[in-house]
């Protein structure tokens, strides 16, 4: 069964409405918060997709919020989008993960698609279709092939396809004749063949991130988004990591809050040892958040066509800072709550599993190598400089 919103469509913004500030973007989530938070434990227990959460997100206008106003959205981007992603991640990391993929797919279509494709995607989002980006694959991966009569078909499949069976507009990078291309396939036309046995994870169960085989699926010309190579264009590809960092930091917020609740019930929230432990966590989390927000500001200010290497190194810095901060939050929570707090269905136990699983994003060592190479390969700071990461 796929996710479809059946309630009223949220009203469009007023013409000429300004982009929302971070606090205003987070407020969009408020009507959906109780549903998302309330469903999280049940969906972890049964491994089902959090469909009620996404109905609530759509009814609140969250799923269309990143669209520009002229396409029926609120123009939420930059720091406001990061703040919204962090808040959703705090309520439920699986919901935050799937929502981030929805945002990513829409951004790619709006950036690289034709105006007609952008309008179609926006109309689908307003109607309740859920988007996602399924890029991970095994072996030869997904390929786009042209038959003798010129018909396009896919062969191969994807793994870690989050929201499988519920994402109705997956964006599928596939290897074509001239390079990697993006394909958006409506699932009502080409659902693929899912492998239900693939997804047996430690955490993030409710993302339903399965394996799907698309061999034989037909592709129409207007399913193709952009040109070959657009999916990996920088800085958008590397800079997109900032979105999942925001979700992860929201998950760390939930871990800390859960541990704090336990300590308060035990009357130990004022213990010096606990205060020192979570002071260090707070320092790391705030440092990671500020680094992530600064990276976003740098990306937003980067001129079109400029060299993105310095920015991408700074994004890698944000990745390393976030991973370290989130792992420290996990360790502090585990030490604080003890064995009783690590027994299911305690909320701390679920949140720790989800966060530790979600932190396993691809190529963490490569990100750290990029940071080290930037630091050791940088020239000496000129007179008057005070920040080795500041652009000249």
Image (cartoon, helix red, strand yellow):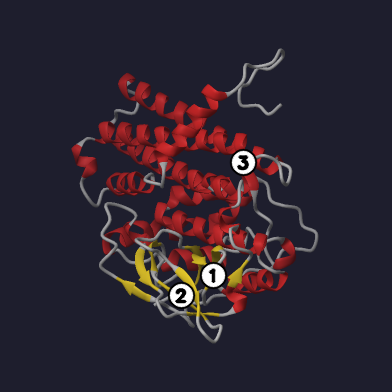
Q: Are marks 2 and 3 in contact (CB under 8 Å)?
A: no
Percent of width and height locating residue 352: 31, 44
CA separation in Å, label 1 and label 3? 27 Å
Q: Is there any visible trace of residue 137 in the rendered image?
A: yes
Give percent across and percent down for residue 172. 49, 66
Mark 1 highlights which residue?
183
Q: Residue furthest bottom?
A: 149
Left or right, 161 with respect to 25, comes to left
Q: Is residue 335 above or below residue 131?
A: above
Q: Which residue is mark 2?
A: 154
The quarter of the displayed image where residue 13 is located: bottom right
Nearer the N terminus, badge 2 or badge 3? Answer: 2
Badge 1: residue crowd in 10 Å (few <14, some 14–19, many ≥20):
many
SS for dot 3: helix
The quarter of the picture where the N terminus appears is bottom left
Asked if 250 appears above or below 376 in the picture, the reply is: below
**In the rendered image, the vertical position of residue 103 relative to residue 386, given as above or below:** below
- Which residue is located at x 56 percent, y 33 percent? 290
Say which residue label 3 marks: 296
CB under 8 Å between callouts 1 and 3? no
Measure the alpha-carbon separation of dots 2 and 1. 10 Å
Determine whether label 2 and label 1 are within 8 Å by CB: yes
Label 2 to label 3, Cα distance in Å?
Answer: 35 Å
Q: How many marks?
A: 3
N-terminal of the pair, mark 1 or mark 3, is 1
């Amino acid at each position: 069964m796929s996710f479809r919103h059946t309630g009223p469509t949220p009203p469009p913004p007023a013409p000429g409405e300004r982009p929302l500030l971070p606090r205003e973007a987070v407020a969009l989530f408020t009507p959906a918060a109780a549903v998302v938070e309330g469903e999280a434990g049940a969906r972890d227990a049964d491994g089902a997709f959090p469909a009620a959460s996404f109905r609530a997100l759509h009814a609140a206008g969250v799923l269309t919020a990143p669209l520009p106003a002229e396409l029926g959205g609120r123009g939420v981007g930059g720091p406001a989008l990061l703040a919204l992603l962090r808040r959703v991640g705090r309520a439920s990391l699986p919901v935050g993960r799937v929502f981030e993929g929805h945002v990513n797919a829409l951004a790619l279509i709006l950036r690289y698609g034709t105006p007609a494709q952008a309008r179609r995607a926006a109309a689908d989002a307003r109607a309740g279709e859920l988007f996602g980006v399924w890029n991970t694959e095994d072996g030869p991966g997904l390929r786009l092939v042209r038959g003798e009569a010129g018909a396009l078909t896919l062969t191969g499949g994807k793994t870690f396809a989050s929201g499988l069976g519920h994402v109705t507009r997956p964006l599928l990078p596939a290897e074509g004749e001239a390079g990697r291309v993006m394909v958006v396939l409506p699932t009502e036309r080409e659902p693929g063949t899912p492998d239900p046995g693939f997804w047996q994870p430690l955490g993030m169960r409710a993302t339903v991130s399965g394996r799907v085989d698309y061999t034989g699926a037909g592709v129409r010309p207007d399913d193709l988004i952009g040109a070959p190579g657009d999916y990996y264009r920088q800085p958008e590809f590397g800079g997109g990591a900032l979105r999942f960092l925001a979700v992860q930091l929201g998950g760390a917020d939930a871990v800390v809050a859960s541990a704090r609740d336990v300590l308060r019930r035990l009357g130990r929230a004022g213990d010096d040892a606990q205060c020192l432990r979570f002071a260090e966590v707070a320092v790391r989390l705030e440092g990671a958040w500020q680094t992530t927000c600064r990276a976003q500001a740098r990306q937003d200010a980067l001129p079109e066509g400029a060299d993105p290497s310095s920015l991408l190194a700074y994004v890698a810095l944000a990745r390393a800072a976030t991973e370290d901060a989130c792992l420290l939050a996990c360790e502090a929570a585990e030490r604080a709550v003890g064995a009783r707090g690590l027994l299911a269905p305690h909320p701390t136990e679920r949140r720790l599993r989800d966060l530790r699983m979600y932190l396993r994003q691809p190529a963490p060592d490569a990100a750290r190598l990029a940071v080290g190479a930037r630091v050791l390969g940088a020239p000496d700071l000129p007179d008057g400089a005070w920040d080795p990461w500041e652009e000249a």
